[in-house]
Image (cartoon, helix red, strand yellow):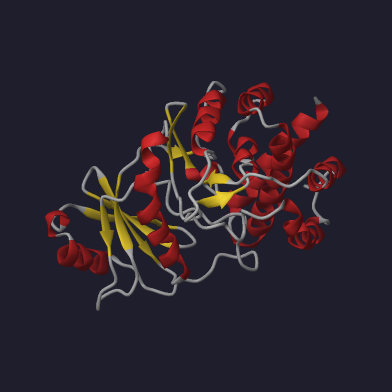
Amino acid sequence: MSAASTAAPGALNPPHGASPPAEFAIDFKLVRQLLSEQCPQYADLALRPLDSGWDNMMFRLGTDLTVRVPRRRVADALMQHEQRWLPRLQPRLPLPIPVPIHCGVPSARFPLHWSVLPWLPGATANRAIPDRNQAKVLGEFLNRLHQPAPADLPLNPARGVPLSHKRAAAAERIAKLAQTNLLDRRLLAVWERALEVTPASGLTWIHGDLHARNILVEHGQLSAVIDWGDISRGDRAVDYASLWSVIDDRRARQACLEQLGDVEAEARSRGWAFFMGLVLADTGRVDHSEHAAMGADIFRRLLDDERA
């Protein structure tokens, strides 16, 4: 993971529109102690803090590794989820993902799970817009990911549900944003049309939180997909929504949707993209300017499609 790739915010389900406070003080001393206790082969490598996301703190370890430590109890289950499922998923995917190299376990010093991960180079896609030809790469990644999921892979209660389950949450955020100039009436029409589409009948593996801060770009090329805490069974349309978060060229987005070849999922995905934009725009007004810019980008690209 890169310095810009620290734990993204679970963008479809943030609490109260603001970044949650840390429940644990994660510092250099603690991480060094955890390494010494559980994987001493890494204990003498250079260590420096990177950044904090909603759920985790990240540290650069040597030149090739990172350490990811939860800052909130809720992130413990997500950490274990990644530790269990990413090794199983990795072989089929055409882009690198952060499969744990060491799975840290709770101890007297720290009560939650944590991970040592590979360093994946690149900047997040909201800071480094990928070349238009990367829409095809993203489409291939999604097709390889969206295969029938094993029965023991949990159903995502937030992202594996029909889009209509988000109606009340969307209405609340629409009301908050009504006084801004972000919500063109055509965007509201996109949302209403998506609500009328038949819900998904077959659930697949999904990333569950696929947006620009969870996709890395290096020299214009997609280089990795990160932050898999929401990996689960669900509607592939949730992940299709990433097209409006990542791909700036309208024709490239459309070509990617044709490559994916699921017309009903495409229609639902526009609704999921709108909902993602709502959440990002709303949280961005509170305490995260980067979210605000990401939400505005999603709305702009959805409108670009409507004008075509």
**Where 300 falls versus 228 (above or below)?**
above
Q: Could you tell me which quadrant the N terminus lies in?
A: top left
Question: Going by the picture, which residue comes out furthest to the bottom?
Answer: 108
| Residue 155 x %, y % | 56, 57
**Where 133 falls versus 59 (above or below)?**
above
Q: Is residue 150 shown left or right of residue 70? A: right
Note whether residue 229 is visible.
yes
| Residue 3 x %, y % | 38, 47
Q: Is residue 129 shown left or right of residue 161? A: left
**Where 262 falls versus 30 (above or below)?**
above
Residue 10, picture quadrant: bottom right
**Residue at image x 16%, y 52%?**
45
| Residue 163 x %, y % | 72, 52
Question: Of residues 277 and 152, which is closer to you in this image?
Answer: 152
Residue 72, picture quadrant: bottom left
Q: Is residue 62 shown left or right of residue 128? A: left
Q: Is residue 258 shown left or right of residue 224? A: right
**Residue at image x 46%, y 62%?**
55
| Residue 85 x %, y % | 40, 51
How many marks do you count on the picture? 0
Note whether residue 129 is visible.
no
Q: Could you tell me which quadrant the C terminus lies in?
A: top right
**Residue at image x 61%, y 42%?**
236
Question: Of residues 116 and 174, which is closer to you in this image?
Answer: 116
Question: Of residues 251 and 203, which is closer to you in this image?
Answer: 203
Question: Going by the picture, which residue comes out furthest to the front?
Answer: 151
Residue 23, picture quadrant: bottom left
